[in-house]
Image (cartoon, helix red, strand yellow):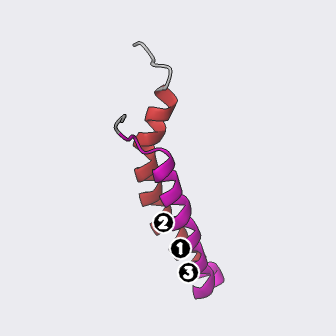
């Protein structure tokens, strides 16, 4: 198997959607259970923002 120089980036591009899709529904209910609704709302905003930024940073756009 020949590894491309940007193999790590391609792996990150592939895993970013899955990581966010798993982190969000796991983190928010756990925080809500232990810390309450206000902390869960803050967690949802932070996790959603980090996930959105990660998706933008790792997006593969066509070359112009």
Cβ–Cβ below 8 Å for labels 1 and 3?
yes
Span of residues in magenta: 32-61
Query: Alpha-carbon distance for marks 3 and 2?
Result: 11 Å
> Is disc 2 in contact with disc 1, using a CB cutoff of under 8 Å?
yes
Q: Quadrant of residue 3?
A: top left
In the image, 38: left or right of 15? right
Secondary structure of the residue carrying numbered label 2: helix
Closer to the chain start, of discs 2 and 1, is: 2
For the residue labelled by badge 1, is the local secondary structure a helix, a strand or a loop? Answer: helix
Answer few, some or many: residues within 10 Å of disc 3's Cα (few below 14, many 20 plus, some between 14 and 19).
Answer: some
Tell me where residue 24 appears, x and y as whole percent: 48, 65
Q: CA distance from mark 2 to mark 1?
A: 7 Å
Residue 35: mark in rendering = none
Q: Which residue is mark 2?
A: 24
Location of mark 3 (residue): 41
Left or right position of 34 against 54: right
Q: Quadrant of the N terminus?
A: top left
- What is the residue that sits farthest to the bottom in this orientation? 37
The one of 56 and 10 positioned closer to us in this rendering: 56
- Please determine whether, in this image, residue 31 is positioned above or below residue 59: below
């Amino acid at each position: 198997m020949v590894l491309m120089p940007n193999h790590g980036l391609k792996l990150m591009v592939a895993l970013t959607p899955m990581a966010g899709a798993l982190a969000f529904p796991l983190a928010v209910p756990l925080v809500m259970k232990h810390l309450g609704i206000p902390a869960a709302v803050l967690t949802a905003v932070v996790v959603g923002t980090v996930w959105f930024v990660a998706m933008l940073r790792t997006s593969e756009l066509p070359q112009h």
